[in-house]
Image (cartoon, grey):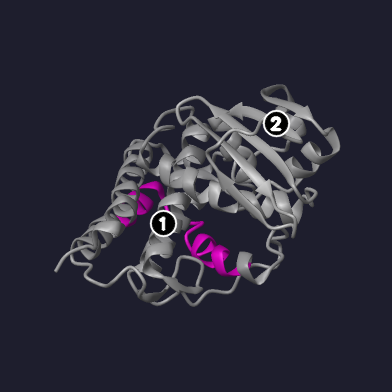
Amino acid sequence: MSLHPSLQTSADAWTHSVEAIAELVQPLVEGEWNRPTPCPYWSVRDIVSHVIGVDCEMLGDPRPIHTLPRDLYHVKTEAQRYQEIQVDVRRHHTGPEMVSELEYTIIRRSRQLRNENRAPDTIVRGPRGIDETLDYAMRRRAFDIWVHEQDLRTALNKPGNLDSPGAYVTRDMLLDVLPKIVAKDAQAPANSAIVIDVHGPVEFLRTVRVDAEGRGSVDGSPSLGPLVSLSTDWETFVRLACGRVSPAAVADRIKSEGDQDLAAAILRSFVVTL
């Protein structure tokens, strides 16, 4: 047996992004590893440490035994603490050490994926230390690593891959949460429709519909009378959703029509991951 066909898209997206990351960081000199990135509080080194650490956990490696310093004031929740351990344990590693560990981890993880024969609905320990299906864990991993590839590209001024396989996994992951953002978090009224129009390397138009009971759903059919229409480019859409920018910082890149209070509430609720 080999990788289930429904998992191949996630595996291909992970491979494309992780190889791009390896190519980006291989030539870096020591000072460049400390550059800040759009990912709050993390440097280039920190993001690569996170990439290595999560894939080591996907491989089943034991977590490092490590105590976080008390002055990491951005670490406020248990979920953040869980993620930060793999990052902080590598904060004093040199550039060559980082590249070597990244490349070795890619080899091991690629071999694991080639030999993966579990069903998509198998329950595994996912990238966040939470039990979830193998399918979701792999989609989440592809999404996460593509976003971090973009963080590194921004920090290193090496734009690219905005329409790579990982971008489409990311699109689908973000579309999955739009109904909750609009209906529950932003409290859009019952029997309303909100149109999201995204242009650029990845284009789509979706309508989020809130039914009479306040439940949200999303589809590709246009609405003739939306309560709100939001239009932006793909890169801005992703950066907003991933907490890399605030709505105010990119207001000139967002076109909003209709109920402006609701539009503002949707944009405030739009951060789905960090």
Image quadrant in which you'd find residue 195 = top right
Looking at the rendered structure, the secondary structure element under dot 2 is strand
| In magenta segment, residue 88 | yes
Single out the mark in the foreground, 2 or 1.
Answer: 2
Q: Position of residue 94 (x, y in %)?
A: 41, 51
Q: Is residue 232 above or below residue 142?
A: above
Amino acid type at circle 2 is Ser
Q: Please tell me which residue is depicted at 74% across the width and 57% down the height of the picture.
A: 214
Can you identify the residue that label 2 sits on?
A: 229
Q: Please tell me which residue is depicted at 46% across the width and 72% down the height of the picture.
A: 132
Q: Nearer the viewer, residue 69 or 46?
A: 46
Question: Which mark is on residue 139?
Answer: 1
Crowd tier of the residue under label 1, counting other residues whose Cα lies within 10 Å: few below 14, some 14–19, many 20 or above: many
Q: Position of residue 56 (x, y in %)?
A: 37, 66
Q: Is residue 61 above or below residue 172?
A: below
Magenta part of the chain: 81-101
The answer to the question of whether label 2 and label 1 lie on touching residues, with beta carbons closer than 8 A, is no
Q: Is residue 75 left or right of residue 138?
A: right
Tell me, yes or no, if residue 148 can be seen here. Answer: no
Label located before the other in sequence (2 or 1) = 1
Q: CA distance from mark 2 to mark 1?
A: 28 Å
Looking at the rendered structure, the secondary structure element under dot 1 is helix
Amino acid type at circle 1 is Arg
Q: Residue furthest right?
A: 261
In the rendered picture of this protein, how many numbered marks are placed on residues?
A: 2
- The main secondary structure of the magenta stretch is helix
Q: Nearer the viewer, residue 172 or 145?
A: 172
